[in-house]
Image (spheres, helix red, strand yellow):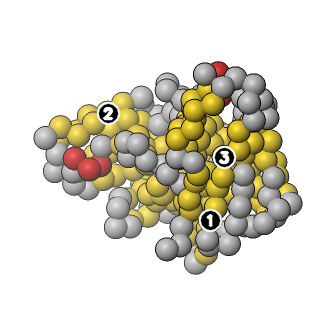
Amino acid sequence: DAGITQSPRYKITETGRQVTLMCHQTWSHSYMFWYRQDLGHGLRLIYYSAAADITDKGEVPDGYVVSRSKTENFPLTLESATRSQTSVYFCASRRLAGGLDTQYFGPGTRLTVL
Amino acid sequence: DAKTTQPNSMESNEEEPVHLPCNHSTISGTDYIHWYRQLPSQGPEYVIHGLTSNVNNRMASLAIAEDRKSSTLILHRATLRDAAVYYCILRRVSGRDDKIIFGKGTRLHILP
């Protein structure tokens, strides 16, 4: 089925380890986004990408790295995880067609950093 | 980036209409007003968007003030499944800089 998927859905890691969260979409949407969501906060934009090989910082990019070698994939890497990066991470893609401008979100990855 | 202001939470009775307000006094002429909602333990989903005119779709209606400094999302007949956090967002497109920034939203409680 077409859609946007994230893996893993749940991840527990330790401080200082590298972690990569995967995001895959089957629509070939140009734009993709990574958000984090913490208790008491709404969604905060980490990074976004307008197309393959084009990425830009969002509101809270520090401690994260992204890449976009293929349109359908947008992995997010925590190079050295910290406890403050414990959060739920959402990936999204954006569809522009027929007067509609819509973001589609994945199911989220719940990351715990011990 | 232009900001939006929403109440932290609202309550409504089941099967009654719900009006969710959003203020965006610094909106620019090219900002679109988008609404998303997030059901418990799920990612956000698109509800509706508009520029100047009121909009209707199968999920909701969007009423935009004439000066565009505020808007209201209308759920015509709320059900328990409409309990969610509702986000009002301004989307500004400026070349490649197409960020979509979410605020804290309004948590809508539906009373049976």
Mark 1: few/some/many CA within 10 Å (<14, 14-19, 20+): many
Mark 1 and 2 residues: CB-CB less than 8 Å, in contact? no
Q: Amino acid at mark 1?
A: Gln
Q: Residue at x 57, y 48 (%)?
A: A8
Rendered image quadrant of residue B61: bottom left
Q: Height in image: A51 above or below B99?
A: below
Q: Residue at label 1?
A: A25
Residue placed under numbered mark 2 in the picture? B10
Q: Chain of mark 2?
A: B
Expressed as whole percent of the image width and height from the top left, the position of residue A15 reads: 70, 23
Q: Nearer the viewer, mark 1 or mark 3?
A: 3
Q: Nearer the viewer, residue B107 or A76?
A: A76
Left or right: B17 in relation to B106:
left
Label 1 vs label 2, nearer the camera: 1
Residue B23 is at least partly visible in this image: no
Residue B81, image x and y in percent? Answer: 26, 50
In the visual, does A59 lie left or right of A114? right
Q: Quadrant of the C terminus of chain B?
A: top left
Q: Is residue B33 left or right of residue A68?
A: left
Going by the numbered disc 3, the residue's amino acid type is: Leu
Name the residue at 49% across, 74% down: A1
Residue found at x 52% / y 41%: A10
* Image location (x, y in percent) of residue A28: 68, 72
> Toward the viewer: B69 or A2?
A2
- Residue A25 position in % (x across, y down): 62, 65
Q: Is residue B84 above or below residue B75?
A: above
